[in-house]
Image (spheres, helix red, strand yellow):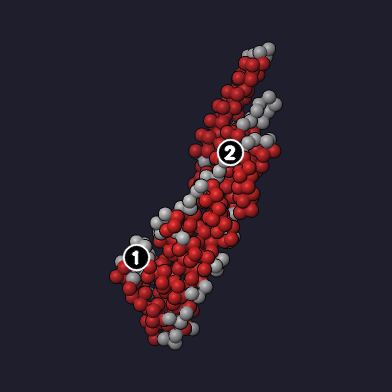
Amino acid sequence: SAGRREDTRAHGKFSQEGWATSALQAMQFRARQPWKRRPWKRRKSQQALVVQCTKQIAASGRRRQWLTALQLLQGLRRPGLELDVVAFNAAMSACEQARQWRPALALATGAQRRGLAVRADTINVVVTACEQGRRWGLALGLLREAGQSLPEPELIMLNALISTCEKCERWRHACELCGEMSTWDLEPDGISCNAAISACEKAGRWWCALLLFGEIPAHRVAPNVVGCNAAISACETAGQWQSALLLFAEMPKRRVKPDVVSCNAAMSACEKAGQWQRALLFLGGMPTRRLAPDVVSCNAAISACEKAGQWQRALLFLGGMPTRRLAPDVVSCNAAIS
């Protein structure tokens, strides 16, 4: 990626010119030499060294130069220097911004070994790293640890945890986290609800998805198309085509405008249930909604016709795809051939 190439170039420059190493050595030299017989001044100089190096680590993170940030942190691990949680946070943030979740988690472990106090921003960074690495178990463990040392977790932290559970298809944990927010005087927002609904959808728990979707107004959250689509897809996957169509019909009442994904999910629900005429009605109504059918839309219509024995219609839709500037794929051809 661009960030990795940039970091590789920066790392090469770092190794060739040695600017960070030289700066660190110079600061360490100033910390050791001038006041050998004045411990309080030496401690003050060492603290200034840690502060200055932490600023350089943060600057490296903003440039996505995570290797540089780690090397600067490593340079501070010397006798007489006390690393604080701010330096670890800066290095973890640099790794997280570069999507390097393994080093971020390793730094979190190192901070724990040093007995550094857990802070909200530390947990937020590491939980985000867990989300990228799909380490839901570790993320939940960090939440338990945070509960012992923090007065209350932040919404962004809980949202990252729910998103981690959603990506790992841990629907039960995602729902429990949504329900437990009230114990911290927090209310789920759109991100929380959508992630939990999506977790239920991926796990085939369509009734849980509907319950969560129905509770959205109670949280004073405005429904959006992402949550609606996840709920419709959950019903579609479970073969609950009537519930899927009911959700689709209620979208305008909730002031949510259906998109192509909404129509495709509803069409697919009809297709799987053998409701081929309803599926074709959705396809025909897309232009009136100012929506352009895509390959998924046409495939659902072709498959619906194929299952109903309407092979002429299936071939008609297949032949009409180029006029819609769509290229038939393997699914299109297989459905038409069947």
Q: Which mark is residue 252?
A: 1
Q: Nearer the viewer, residue 298 or 212?
A: 212
Q: Nearer the viewer, residue 192 or 5?
A: 192
Q: Which mark is residue 119?
A: 2
Could you tell me if residue 29 is visible in this image? no
Residue shown at the point (66%, 13%) measured from the top left: 38
Element marked by disc 2: loop
Across and down, in percent, residue 330 comes to 48, 74
Across and down, in percent, residue 235 comes to 48, 71
- Relative to residue 270, is residue 289 drawn left or right? left
Image quadrant assignment for residue 165:
bottom right
Across and down, in percent, residue 242 comes to 44, 75
Residue shown at the point (68%, 35%) measured from the top left: 114
- Relative to residue 22, is residue 287 drawn left or right? left
Q: Is residue 119 above or below residue 287?
A: above
Which amino acid type is shown beneath numbered disc 2? Arg
Mark positioned earlier in the residue sequence (1 or 2): 2
User: Dot 2, crowdedness within 10 Å: few (<14), some or many (≥20)?
Assistant: some
User: Dot 1, crowdedness within 10 Å: few (<14), some or many (≥20)?
Assistant: few
Could you tell me if residue 137 is visible in this image? yes
Q: Is residue 138 above or below residue 241?
A: above
Which amino acid type is shown beneath numbered disc 1? Pro
Question: In the current view of this chain or complex, which residue is farthest to the top?
Answer: 37
Element marked by disc 1: loop
Contact flag, marks 1 and 2 (Cβ < 8 Å): no
Residues at marks 1 and 2, CA–CA distance in whole angstroms: 43 Å
Residue shown at the point (47%, 58%) measured from the top left: 194
Q: Nearer the viewer, residue 314 or 3?
A: 314
